[in-house]
């Protein structure tokens, strides 16, 4: 019950941050160099993350959509903090669920709420020497309960990095709803990197997709 309430609070907090007038930012036109035969429109860039000194220091760099806000996550520190609380079993399990998925841990969260959508583009990183991008991505998806109809494909980012992408459906047991999600993974000398786009529902996912495609179009190794 406590876990369910906590999860509902997290999801509810996202919902409260939508624009009060319900407006959505317009999609920008697709630019040259979009990756993949079915590439969507890409969003206007509002900055770059990845390099030293940026909001999130990562093994890769890519452009973040205008008005989206990036925040670095120290998963190791947060997991350690959760394990030291009085209700350590619950806190630890809850932290694990949100900060670790398969072979990767959360490293950066890029919030769409300032741009008028409900959801995040999250970056996950793994240790050097882990499996190839495809293997890491499959393990990432396998670690998420409620996944169905996963479809994988290989492509190259706009920065020339070989990547593997997946699109799938996720069904929440708590909310009893099914929605579309997308992710792609690349391998780097410092370990694998996974970028995942969720959203409150499929409609939000599709409205945020231009920001995800912008990351695909601009991602390169640091």
Image: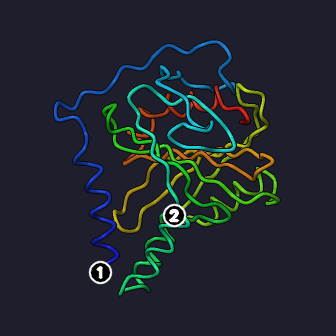
Question: Which residue is situated farthest in the front direction here?
Answer: 53
Q: CA distance from mark 2 to mark 1?
A: 21 Å
Where 28 falls versus 55 (above or below)? Answer: above
Residue furthest left in the image: 20
**x and y percentages locating residue 68 in the rendered image:** 41, 33
Residue position for label 1: 1
Q: Quadrant of residue 118?
A: top left
Circle 2 or circle 1, nearest the eye: 2
10 Å crowding of disc 2: few (<14), some (14-19), many (20+): some
Q: Nearer the viewer, residue 38 or 214?
A: 214
x, y percent for residue 40:
55, 25
Residue in the picture at 56% in, 27% down: 214
Few, some or many C-alpha atoms within 10 Å of disc 1 (few <14, some 14-19, many ≥20)? few
For the point 30% across and 70% down, which residue is it? 6
Work out whether residue 144 or residue 173 is closer to the camera in this orientation and state it.
Answer: 144
Element type at marker 1? loop
Q: Residue 166: give x, y in percent of width and height.
A: 65, 46
Q: Which mark is residue 169?
A: none
Instruction: Indicate which disc, 2 or 1, sits on the residue closer to the N terminus.
Output: 1
Question: Quick one: SS at disc 2?
Answer: helix
Locate residue 74, reporting x and y percent: 52, 59
Rendered-image quadrant of the N terminus: bottom left
What residue lies at 54% left-to-right and 36% top-to-bottom?
Answer: 54
Q: Quadrant of residue 61?
A: top right
> Is 75 drawn above or below residue 133 in the view shown?
below
On residue 99, the disc is 2
Q: Is residue 213 left or right of residue 112?
A: right
What quarter of the picture does the C terminus occupy? top right
Seen in the image, is 211 located left or right of residue 131?
Answer: left
Residue 217, image quadrant: top right
> Residue at image x 30%, y 33%?
116
- The answer to whether the residue labelled 2 contacts the one labelled 1, judged by CB atoms less than 8 Å apart, is no
């Amino acid at each position: 019950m406590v876990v369910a309430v906590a999860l509902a609070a997290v999801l509810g907090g996202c919902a409260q941050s939508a624009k009060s007038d319900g407006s959505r930012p317009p999609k920008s036109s697709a630019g040259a160099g979009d990756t993949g035969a079915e590439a969507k429109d890409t969003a206007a860039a509002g900055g770059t993350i990845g390099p030293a000194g940026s909001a999130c220091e990562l093994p890769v760099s890519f452009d973040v959509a205008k008005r989206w806000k990036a925040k670095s996550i120290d998963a190791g520190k947060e997991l350690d903090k959760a394990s030291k609380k009085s209700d350590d079993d619950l806190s630890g399990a809850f932290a694990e669920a949100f900060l670790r998925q398969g072979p990767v841990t959360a490293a950066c969260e890029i919030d769409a709420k300032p741009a008028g959508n409900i959801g995040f583009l999250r970056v996950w990183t793994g240790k050097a020497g882990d499996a190839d991008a495809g293997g890491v991505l499959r393990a990432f998806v396998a670690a998420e309960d409620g996944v169905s109809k996963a479809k994988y494909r290989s492509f190259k980012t706009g920065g020339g990095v070989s990547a593997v992408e997946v699109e799938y459906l996720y069904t929440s047991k708590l909310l009893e709803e099914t929605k579309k999600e997308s992710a792609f993974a690349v391998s780097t000398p410092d370990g694998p990197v996974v970028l995942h786009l969720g959203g409150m529902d499929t409609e939000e996912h599709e409205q945020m997709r231009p920001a995800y495609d912008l990351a695909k179009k601009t991602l390169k190794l640091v």
